[in-house]
Amino acid sequence: MTGTKSDSSNQITEKTWMADRGVILTLSIFVSLIFYIGCAAVSGNPVGPPPDPVTVKEIVEMHEAGLPSETIINNIQQSHTVYRIQAGQLVQLKEMGVSDEVINYMQQTYIDAARQNQAYEDWSSFTLADDGFWYGGPFYGGPFWY
């Protein structure tokens, strides 16, 4: 009889172990899935095509249309456009009536991009557009997505 108790005790232990193993496997899959989703969410890789750039011409048009600086800056933020503006172009923007707040933000896009990715310090990360301004970012072949 002692052998029977031992066998049933082993069967119970084995059943418990199998149940525990199933729980551990389920939890492992769940944690892995959460980790994967979290990494994808913070990786900065957008879903779908990159946004259209906001060109200097469009910025001037928005200003002339009377849009507030905050709206223009919000459009720039959503487009992830990076501007590499030279001194003469800053004067040109000011003469076109673009507000200091917008011009400062445009300059800040380059500073922030260069801090995040040193490749932006190289001129090859930018494209000279027809309007004479240098643009970078995901749509101009910039070094990374936001």
Image (cartoon, grey):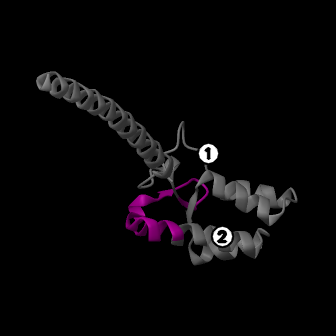
Query: What amino acid type should be assigned to the residue bearing mark 2?
Result: Tyr
Residue 54 can be seen, yes or no: no
Q: Residue at x 46, y 69 (%)?
A: 114
Nearest to the observer: residue 7 or residue 145: 7
Residue 44 can be seen, yes or no: yes
Outermost residue toward the right?
Answer: 66
User: In the rendered structure, does residue 120 fall within the stretch colored magenta?
Assistant: yes
Side of 4 relative to 35 (left or right): left
Q: Is residue 89 above or below residue 79?
A: below
User: In the rendered structure, does residue 64 fall within the stretch colored magenta?
Assistant: no
Contact (Cβ within 8 Å) of mark 2 with mark 1:
no
Locate residue 141, reporting x and y percent. Answer: 44, 50
Side of 65 relative to 21 (left or right): right
Q: Residue at x 78, y 64 (%)?
A: 70
Q: Residue at x 52, y 43 (%)?
A: 46
Nearest to the observer: residue 62 or residue 27: 27
Locate residue 100, reporting x and y percent. Answer: 74, 76
Q: Earlier in the sequence, mark 2 or mark 1?
A: 1
Locate residue 15, reporting x and y percent. Answer: 28, 26
Which residue position holds label 1? 52
Magenta range is: 112-135
Crowding near the residue tagged with mark 2, few <14, some 14–19, many ≥20 C-alpha atoms within 10 Å: some
Which residue position holds label 2? 105
The secondary structure type at the circle numbered 1 is loop
Compute the Cα span from label 2 to label 1. 18 Å
Locate residue 79, reporting x and y percent. Answer: 62, 51
Q: Residue at x 61, y 50 (%)?
A: 53
